[in-house]
Image (cartoon, rainbow, N blue to C red):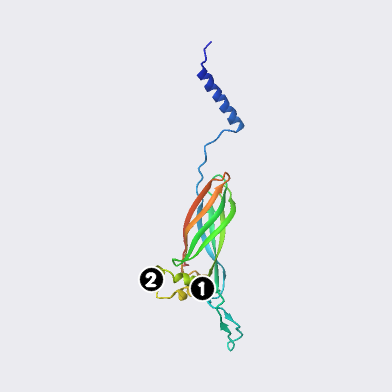
Amino acid sequence: MPIVGKGAKMNRAVTIFTTFLVALGLTVLPAIAVEAPVITLDRVDVASIQPFYVKPRIGFKSAEEPGKEETYGYSSTLSLAYIFSIKNPNKVAIMLNEFQFTADFEGFDVNTVMVYEGSWIPPEKTNQLRVVVTNEAFPTIVSLMVGAEHAARITEMKTTAGALVSKWWKDISDFTFPIGVSNGTALFNDEKGQEIRSVFSAKWEKKKE
């Protein structure tokens, strides 16, 4: 009869114990690497718009009684809907938690957007996210008057901050100027709480004739 040493008995015991754990589904499997979701800008829509004004006209009745312009601390607004596709390339579901980006018109930053969402994306599927961003005329004009870089570009364009913003309001329905998305960051987590980060940028080009 062969003599079995203590080391052989120990190895055999470990093998039997491991087989037992596998049968019970209790073994710790290697962690599956989770890929960052892919974010693309599908399109930009006009959600709502008011005729361009900086000072509202109060008391208008007719051309003979036009009322008067007053400064009440508000001006006309323009709301755009940014429609993003978020593709989950993983074999596990992930949840979108935070989503932010900077919006620009013709390369001028006009808004910073932050969205706090709780939306699950199934494995290997694509969800859409619609983000409505509202810009107000007067604050947009003021933002273009800050910084030497903006001033230099506006001078090169042979226009003024007010005239440029007015043009954006009037031309937005035809998308005659490029709209950009930059500094985009989205935070996700899987079912185990592991955090995943995606970065993105995009440009919605003006319509071609």
Which residue is outermost to the top?
1
Which badge, 1 or 2, comes first in the chain's sequence?
A: 1
Q: Using the rendered image of the protein, determine whether residue 89 is visible from the camera's viewpoint.
A: no
Q: 85 above or below 47?
A: above
Residue at image coords 52%, 59%: 42
Tell me the crowding category of disc 2: few under 14, some 14 to 19, or many 20 or more residues within 10 angstroms, Cα based: few
Q: 125 above or below 147?
A: above
Q: 19 above or below 38?
A: above
Which residue is outermost to the bottom?
64
Q: Which element carries disc 1, helix, strand or loop?
A: helix
Q: Nearer the viewer, residue 71 or 4?
A: 71
Q: Position of residue 154 (x, y in %)?
A: 41, 72
Residue at image coords 50%, 19%: 7
Does the residue at mark 1 contact the one at mark 2 (Cβ under 8 Å)?
no
Residue named by callout 1: 138
Amino acid type at circle 1 is Phe
Q: Position of residue 140 (x, y in %)?
A: 49, 70
Q: Position of residue 5 (x, y in %)?
A: 51, 16
Tell me the crowding category of disc 1: few under 14, some 14 to 19, or many 20 or more residues within 10 angstroms, Cα based: some
Left or right relative to 182: residue 115: right
Q: 36 above or below 6?
A: below
Residue at image coords 56%, 52%: 96
Residue named by callout 2: 152
Q: Nearer the viewer, residue 185 or 34?
A: 185
Amino acid type at circle 2 is Ala
